[in-house]
Image (cartoon, grey):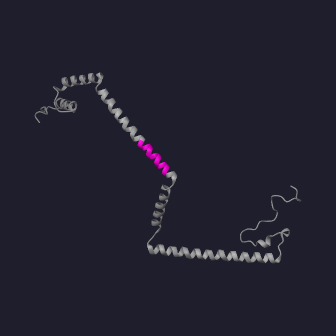
Amino acid sequence: MDRGKPGLLRADPVPEAGEDVAATIGATETLSEEEQEELRRELAKVEEEIQTLSQVLAAKEKHLTEIKRKLGINSLQELKQNTAKGWQDVTATPAYKKTSETLSQAGQKASAAFASKGSVITKKLEDVKNSPTFKSFEEKVENLKTKVGGPKPSGGEFEVFNSTANASTTSTESLPECTQESA
């Protein structure tokens, strides 16, 4: 790199925070005494304003803490309030509203689909029950039941279970057989 031409990198150090800017200015950037004095006054003024603002902020934070103490507000309550406020802010966003609406519609469609599938399944089961194959199977079970447990009781839907239970009771134990007619 040619030293005669100014490059991207500066050879003189860049002042850090708190350093005296006027003291680090190179010979090529000389300021008059008047300009240096003006910059020093401005620097002092800005530093004083920063100090004042820091004191005001500290006083306001102390006052805030005192008010919260008098109101009985503690960190847990603040957390609850902040969480509630945050959730309220989230639910107010257009993205949340759109997502909620979309999920609601999807839920409604899914419910309708399940309802229609349920009625289709019910219809299919009725078709199977009324099919000749099922009727034949049902007759064979009735015949077997008659051979094993005697005549068909008039007890309702659980006839097979009742007769099977009665058959197993009489075959395993020597108790008298109870029928529903005597009960």
| 129 left or right, relative to 56 | left
130 over 111 or under it: above or below: above
5 over 104 or under it: above or below: below
Q: Nearer the viewer, residue 17 or 35?
A: 35
Residue 94 is situated, as x and y percent measured from the top left of the image, at 51, 53
73 over 118 or under it: above or below: below
Q: Residue at position x 44%, y 46% from top?
A: 104
Quadrant, the N terminus? bottom right
Q: Residue at position x 47%, y 46% from top?
A: 102
Q: Nearer the viewer, residue 139 or 49?
A: 49
Residue extending farthest to the right is 4
**Most common secondary structure along the magenta stretch:** helix
73 magenta-colored = no
77 over 161 or under it: above or below: below
Q: How many marks?
A: 0
Q: Residue at position x 60%, y 76% from top?
A: 55
Residue 132 is situated, as x and y percent measured from the top left of the image, at 29, 22
| 4 left or right, relative to 88 | right
Q: Residue at position x 21%, y 22% from top?
A: 143
Q: Quadrant of residue 171?
A: top left
Q: Quadrant of residue 145?
A: top left
| 174 left or right, relative to 1 | left
Residue 154 is situated, as x and y percent measured from the top left of the image, at 16, 30
98 magenta-colored = yes
Q: Nearer the viewer, residue 158 or 131?
A: 131
Residue 25 is situated, as x and y percent measured from the top left of the image, at 81, 70
Which range of residues does the magenta coloring cover? 97-108
Quadrant, the C terminus? top left
